[in-house]
Image (cartoon, rainbow, N blue to C red):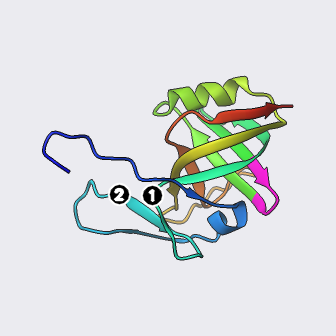
Amino acid sequence: MSQGQPPMREVAQRAFAREFNAATYTFREDDDERAPIYALLPTGAKANHVFIVGKLTKTEDAGNDNEYWQEQIVDPMGTVFVYAGQYQPEAASMLRETEPPAFVAVVGKPRVPTKPTTELSTFHSALSIWPSSTPTLLIDG
């Protein structure tokens, strides 16, 4: 990459819910604080972005002062949770406007918590996705 050029986004790894939820290890390939964080999938693939397709079964605004949308996506292998807030305004807008059930495709960054959560809600998953772009509505209802 030459000076002044924006970094190229890596290709998203396609993952089913069970595979994505089994990824519990994250790493960086160098010590630069801006280096991408990868999730290690059970297949051995490293994923800075993941691509998930499934049925949107639940959306909920869990924000107190700001919108903070939680989305539950189900595929034949399990459930994946997607979160979008003020830093993903297009994704949050799509989640606000889409009524479940609907089939969606999401590309986003995997998030593995680095510290244990003490307060768990019924709509919580340890592993989640933060959309990199607006989720795509494939089939409405």
The magenta span reads 73-78
Q: Is residue 65 visible?
A: no
Write the residue at 39% across / 60% down.
37
Write the residue at 63% across / 46% down.
82
In the figure, is residue 74 to the left or right of 108? right
Query: The residue under label 2 is which amino acid type?
Result: Pro
Depth check: give the residue in front, 43 or 132: 43
Helix, strand or loop at label 1? It is loop
Q: Which mark is residue 48?
A: 1
Residue 8 position within the rendered picture, expressed as x and y whole percent measured from the top left: 33, 47
Residue 65 position within the rendered picture, expressed as x and y whole percent measured from the top left: 55, 27
Q: Which mark is residue 123?
A: none
Depth check: give the residue in front, 118 or 28: 28
Residue 63 position within the rendered picture, expressed as x and y whole percent measured from the top left: 60, 33
Residue 136 position within the rendered picture, expressed as x and y whole percent measured from the top left: 65, 34
How crowded pointer 1 is (Cα within 10 Å; few <14, some 14-19, many 20+) is rated as many
Q: Main secondary structure of the magenta part?
A: strand
Question: Is 74 inside the magenta-drawn segment?
Answer: yes
User: Contact (CB < 8 A) between labels 1 and 2?
Assistant: yes
Question: Is 9 inside the magenta-drawn segment?
Answer: no
Write the residue at 31% across / 69% down.
29
Is the residue 134 above or below the residue 27 in the image? above
Write the residue at 55% across / 54% down.
50
- Give the mark nearest the N terminus, 1 or 2: 2
Query: The residue under label 1 is which amino acid type?
Result: Asn
Is the residue 117 above or below the residue 24 in the image? above
Q: Which residue is mark 2?
A: 36
Helix, strand or loop at label 2? It is loop
Work out which quarter of the rendered image holds the C terminus and state it: top right
Report the number of numbered marks: 2
User: Residue 55, located in which quarter of the rendered image?
Assistant: top right
